[in-house]
Image (cartoon, rainbow, N blue to C red):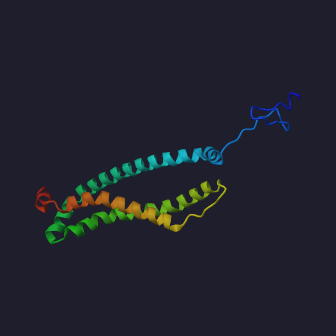
Amino acid sequence: MSKKNKPDTRGFVYSTNPDFSFEYNFLDADYLKMYTAENIISVLSKYFAAMAILISCLGLFGLAAFTAERKRKEIGIRKVVGASVINITTMLSGEFLKLILFALLLACPLAWWALNKWLQNFAYKINISWWVFALAGVGAILIALVTVSFQAVKAAIANPVKSLRTE
């Protein structure tokens, strides 16, 4: 028997291409290697999104506190005239709701464009539905309203005599 047709330990003869050994891989491991970068980006995106939401909530909370303090006398006059807590909370939260809706009008088309560009790199393409952006918008509005409403209710239940006495 020649060196090229030498049998292995199991008795098989590699005569087709003896210089190269047969190496096998599982298909799921190959796919995992191929999409490792996307998996890392996914994990990092979750952490950075959580940080961005936290920072934006802190900014909204500070802005709501500043607005409530700036309108303290107006709120006091409205309460003396007969405005309810719901009316005052709606007044203060309405300003922030307009800002959030404006931000959504800017962000949704940009996000749609960026996601379509990113999804073109994959073999199997999907279309992004409108309800994804609607759900994200509703979530952003709810988070912002919860953040702002705490300061709005705090300003609405304050004693109007204290705010008007400082004049």
Place of residue 95 in the rendered image (x, y in percent of width and height, measured from the top left): 33, 64
Place of residue 61 in the rendered image (x, y in percent of width and height, measured from the top left): 30, 53
Residue 93 is left or right of residue 124, and the answer is left
Residue 118 is left or right of residue 62, and the answer is right
Q: Residue at x 55, y 61 (%)?
A: 112
Place of residue 70 in the rendered image (x, y in percent of width and height, measured from the top left): 24, 56
- Rendered view: 163 above or below 15: below
Q: Is residue 99 visible?
A: no
The image quarter containing residue 122 is bottom right
Q: Residue at x 35, y 53 (%)?
A: 57
- Rendered view: 52 above or below 136: above
Q: Nearer the viewer, residue 7 or 85?
A: 7
Q: Residue furthest right?
A: 2
- Rendered view: 23 above or below 109: above
Q: Residue at x 58, y 44 (%)?
A: 37
The image quarter containing residue 20 is top right
Q: The C terminus lies in which quarter of the figure?
A: bottom left
Residue 141 is left or right of residue 153, and the answer is right
Q: Residue furthest top?
A: 3
Q: Nearer the viewer, residue 153 or 7?
A: 7
Q: Nearer the viewer, residue 4 or 31?
A: 4
Q: Is residue 93 visible?
A: yes
The image quarter containing residue 21 is top right
Q: Residue at x 41, y 49 (%)?
A: 50
Q: Residue furthest bottom?
A: 82
Residue 89 is left or right of residue 126, and the answer is left
